[in-house]
Amino acid sequence: MQLNCAWTLVACFGLALSGCSGGDAPTGGASGGKEGGPKKYRIAVIPKGTTHEFWKSVHAGADHAAKELGNVEIIWKGSQLEDDRDGQISVVQNFITQRVDGICLAPLDSQSLGRYVEEAKQEKIPTVIFDSALDDESSIVSYVATDNYQGGVLAARELAKTLNGKGGVIVLRYNPGSESTKLREEGFLDTIGKEFPEITVLSSNQYSGTTPETSLDKSQPLLIKFRDQLDGVFTVCEPNSTGMFKALEQEGLVGKVKFIGFDPSPQLIESMRKSNVHGIVLQDPVKMGYQAVMTLMDHIQGKPVEKRISTGEYVATPANMDDPQIDKLLHPQQFGE
């Protein structure tokens, strides 16, 4: 009996020297460093999609955080398109199965992803949400994002300024279930209704879909229908801004209709320099990716974190686009640069 106990102690001591994770590790996926060094944490970062410029900048920020920390491996994976809820759910489930040490998630849907975040929590895998919130935040560590409602407020005030406080405007919505763009739409519409009684919202119930092509298809009928009444347009993210601008070009309305977009693209920036785009609401996607990873790692290491972390919102115009801070946000770093 004593001999068996002795062998048990030796075996446990050997496991400790090997650097294997013990029962007090934050999650089951971290691997021990070489020669007893720090653990290497595997963090899954899941964007809404992988094609738009915004997500490439989020990726750059997450990668910068991992390099700064030194003991973190970023696993970047998402659906190609931003309407693939089932695809994103599958990605989350696969990372839970792999028992990563933590998840940073930009949910495509504020409701349907909630149960899988709860599932991750039950498996002791913490989740930081970024960009778009979940309806139920009880299972998350923190929410890192732009104040999207305030972004809509800024857009409304800038568009109203260019219109001298009067005229007819269109809001082209994005995609049902997207919490971030919904808040932008609400911030814009609430502000127009409260602060600018001489501005009429001609249309605010049309959704562009998730690509520039579907946005173009939705934009053209609106421009044709309201052409004689239309003075301004607000679009709430990069792909629907791109599609709307193309429709304005095709209908000969560029420069005639005041245009405020959300998130930059090379075409919108070039057009703003020509004063054909009158404003772009900006986020800080690099900071968002960086802060999401840093916040998750603070939590894993037992440090207190804020439940809500804002990454800022700004408005670029033809007048301020060359200011150093605005220029940096118009041309954020992208992964691989």
Image: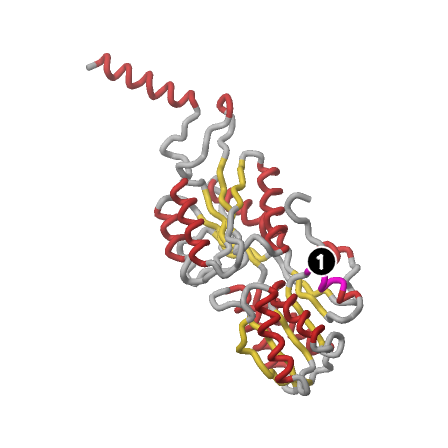
Image mark count: 1
Q: Position of residue 164 (x, y in %)?
A: 73, 82
Judge by depth and name the residue closer to the eye, 326 or 194: 326
SS class of the residue under badge 1?
Answer: helix
Q: Quadrant of residue 113?
A: bottom left
The x, y position of residue 267, in whole percent, is: 72, 62
Task: Answer with left or right where residue 156 lies relative to residue 120.
Answer: right
| In magenta segment, residue 250 | no
Residue drawn at (40%, 23%) of the image: 16
In the image, residue 196 sits, relative to residue 330, either above or below, namely below
Which residue is at a point 46% across and 51% down the rendered structure image? 141
Is residue 68 shown left or right of residue 303?
Answer: right
Could you say which quadrant of the image residue 169 lies in?
bottom right
Which residue bears the numbered disc 1? Answer: 330
* The magenta segment: 265-270
Q: Position of residue 202 (x, y in %)?
A: 60, 83
- Please name the amino acid that badge 1 sits on: Leu
Residue 177, above or below 169: above
Residue 238 picture location, percent across and down: 63, 63
Circle 1 Cα neighbour tier, 10 Å, few/some/many (<14 / 14–19 / ≥20): many
Q: Which quadrant is home to the N terminus?
A: top left
Q: At 52% from the left edge and 69% from the top edge, which residue is drawn?
A: 182
Going by the image, does 88 lie left or right of 274? left
Q: Quadrant of the C terminus?
A: top right
Main secondary structure of the magenta stretch: helix
Q: Is residue 41 above or below residue 294?
A: above
Most extreme residue toward the top is 3
Q: Nearer the viewer, residue 297 or 66?
A: 66
